[in-house]
Image (spheres, rainbow, N blue to C red):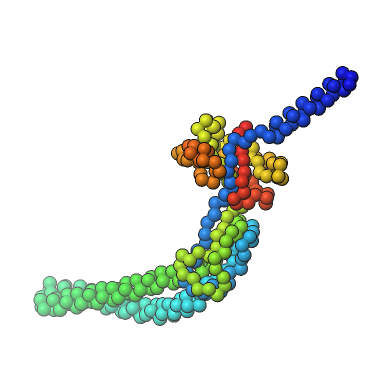
């Protein structure tokens, strides 16, 4: 074998072994992907008229997906509105009575001015003065009583207005929405079932990005900072990994023993710190999927 062939073979061997060493670089931490999920619960009692969603459905915007029967709420509201109209009609009568009393009061004040002058001139007696003062006092009390009655009616109307608002709120809460872009993870109820306030209906999560929760030991902690970008690896095949990019969004302030999902006892007894790395999801990331990170 001549020297040129030997050099070529040596270079090829070095390239192959160099490539393998890079591809087989050990990751710094391991974990599983998770999402921030939340449960939408019923905010009213009644029968589910419909619930139009299934597990796995993806919603891009706020969307109405169901409604709880509101028939009784609507009838209660209409009954209150009718009663309010009847009560409100009495206010005009009350205002008319106040106007009459105030007119009588005005006339009495004029009579009092004349009686007082006549009394000073000796043309009226003390009884005349007392009588006119007594009549004015009676009118004052009558006006006060009617105004109190009016205040009670106004308070009753205000109470009815609040009751109507409460019913409108319950009617609004009977409409079931997907509140924001999300994926349906679990569905707990079906149409025509009876539900109560607080009964879980379905579970959602925003799957546009997932968090990879990994664990690092104390020797690695100083290498990771909030906002730092790291390399994220997921399985691409039995032998190969796919490289993604993630951002460190949370670092635990307290150490803990390695979770029991770690296979070896030697690893489980180590004190580690939990770290969350957020990764944009193009659809291939799933909750529970394993992942690894390499610190840059």
145 displayed left or right of 40: left
What residue appears at the point 41 percent right and 69 percent down from the top-left corner? 162
Quadrant placement of the N terminus: top right
Residue 142, position as x, y percentages in the image: 24, 77
Which residue is nearer to you in this view: 76 or 99? 76
Residue closest to the far top: 3
Kindly indicate the quadrant of the structure image that contains residue 220: top right
What residue appears at the point 70 percent right and 35 percent down from the top-left corner? 23
Q: How many marks?
A: 0
Which residue is nearer to you in this view: 1 or 219? 1
Which residue is nearer to you in this view: 237 or 58? 237
The correct choice, above or below, for 39 with respect to 14 in the image is below
Residue 143, position as x, y percentages in the image: 27, 75
Quadrant placement of the C terminus: top right
Residue 95, position as x, y percentages in the image: 35, 76
Residue 264 visible in the current orientation: yes
95 displayed left or right of 10: left
Residue 201, position as x, y percentages in the image: 53, 65
Which residue is nearer to you in this view: 132 or 27? 27
The correct choice, above or below, for 181 with respect to 98 in the image is above
193 displayed left or right of 280: left
What residue appears at the point 84 percent right and 21 percent down from the top-left corner? 7
Residue 208 visible in the current orientation: no
What residue appears at the point 80 percent right and 24 percent down from the top-left corner? 11
Kindly indicate the quadrant of the structure image that contains residue 197: bottom left
Residue closest to the far right: 2
């Amino acid at each position: 074998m001549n020297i040129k062939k030997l050099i070529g073979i040596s270079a090829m061997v070095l390239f192959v072994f160099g490539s393998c060493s890079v591809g087989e670089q050990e990751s710094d931490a391991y974990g599983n992907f998770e999402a921030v999920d939340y449960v939408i619960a019923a905010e009213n009692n009644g029968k589910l008229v419909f619930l139009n969603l299934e597990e796995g459905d993806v919603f891009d915007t706020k969307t109405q997906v169901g409604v709880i029967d509101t028939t009784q709420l609507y009838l209660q509201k209409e009954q209150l509105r009718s009663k309010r109209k009847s009560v409100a009609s009495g206010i005009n009568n009350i205002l008319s009575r106040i106007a009459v009393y105030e007119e009588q009061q005005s006339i009495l004040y004029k009579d009092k001015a004349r009686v007082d002058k006549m009394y000073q001139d000796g043309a009226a007696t003390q009884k005349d003065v007392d009588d006119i003062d007594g009549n004015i006092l009676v009118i004052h009390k009558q006006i006060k009583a009617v105004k109190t009655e009016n205040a009670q009616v106004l308070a009753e109307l205000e109470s009815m207005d609040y009751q109507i608002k409460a019913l409108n709120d319950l009617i609004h809460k009977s409409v079931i929405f997907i509140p924001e872009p999300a994926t349906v993870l679990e569905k707990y109820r079906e149409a025509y079932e009876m539900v109560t306030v607080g009964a879980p209906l379905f579970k959602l999560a925003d799957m546009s990005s997932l968090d990879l929760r990994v664990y690092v030991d104390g020797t690695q902690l100083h290498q990771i900072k909030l906002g730092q970008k790291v390399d994220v690896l997921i399985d691409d095949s039995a032998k190969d990994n796919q490289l993604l990019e993630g951002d460190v969004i949370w670092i635990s302030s307290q150490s803990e023993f390695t979770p029991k999902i770690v296979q070896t006892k030697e690893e489980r007894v180590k004190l580690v710190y939990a770290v969350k790395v957020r990764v944009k999801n193009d659809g291939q990331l799933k909750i529970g999927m394993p992942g690894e990170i390499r610190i840059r």
